[in-house]
Image: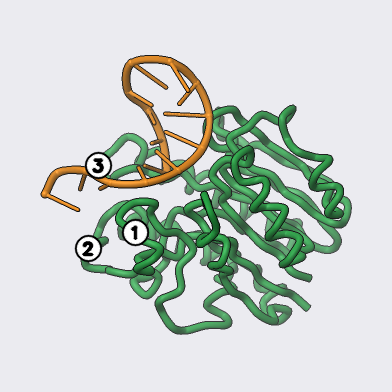
Chain colours: A green, B orange
Amino acid sequence: MKIATWNVNSLKVRLPHLLEWAGQAEPDLLALQEIKQENAAFPHAELAALGYQAVVSGQKTYNGVALLARAAQSAIVTEIPGYADLQRRVLAATVNDLRVINLYVVNGQDPQSDKFRYKLEWLQAVTAWIAEELRSHPRLVVLGDFNIAPEDRDVYDPESWYEQVLCSSAERAALQRLLALGLHDSFRLCHDDGGHYSWWDYRAAAFRRNQGLRIDLLLVSDALRQRVVAAGIDTAPRSWERPSDHAPAWVTLQ
DNA sequence: ATGGTGGACGATCCA
């Protein structure tokens, strides 16, 4: 089973890339972030033609997440329990024998900003929710745009990113608290080296120079760890015309 | 060089 995540940065603009990539890569399950459109605008028909059924938590202008799957999805959750949030950033579903949680983690802008406080508060609420989900769903995948590079080896220039947003110790500690629930970064179960990134700034020719960060993650629970066969990031779509600033990341499970 | 680009939307906000 192949599972993937992709921040498409506007599904309206990126639908041709999505159809092209999904048609080639053939994931069984694909989590999307930053679709930036309302549920009513979602391109169900185009994706159904590729064999996908979608569940959507859309929002106009900003945010918005979706889950595409070849199999039926059930027990849909679009809110973090007990945490009032107008921003559409989470989507959970049960697919086959897996529980899947799609996250578009708050960016945070700058460690001194109000948005950063929101990021940490949001991560705390999500972690509490996932702890609860794990109790009833031991076979859990948490995937999405985490807006956190877990370690310096996930950053092209750690010195210039030191204590900057996406890399700060406060964010990394929050991610570690999530992982400590019994989740594993599937990419790191398969690869030890640096230089692998999933996001490159649109500016300063960052992709051409491979100046990126690995911030799009697929976490698997203890019960799924032994089923991980391979993991990777498909950088090709980032080189296509008018790309998302993120590349799709994936994991295959036995 | 304290910038640069891109999406949404229609002046800035967000990333």
Please indicate, yes or no, whether residue A17 appears anywhere in the rendered image.
Answer: yes
Q: Secondary structure at mark 2?
A: helix
Respond whether the residues carrying marks 3 and 2 are from the same subunit.
Answer: yes
> Which residue appears at 73% of the width and 66% of the height?
A24
Instruction: Give the residue pinned by disc 1.
Output: A205
Left or right of A208 on screen, residue A65: right
Read off the chain for label 1: A
Instruction: Give the residue pinned by disc 2.
Output: A160
Read off the chain for label 3: A
Outermost front residue: A241
Q: Quadrant of residue A197?
A: bottom left
> Which residue appears at 38% of the width and 66% of the height?
A208
> Which residue appears at 56% of the width and 74% of the height?
A187
Query: From the image, which quarter does the N terminus of chain A lie in?
Result: bottom right
Residue A125 x/y as whole percent: 52, 44
Respond whether the residues carrying marks 1 and 3 are from the same subunit.
Answer: yes
In space, the residues marked 1 and 2 are separated at their CA atoms by 17 Å
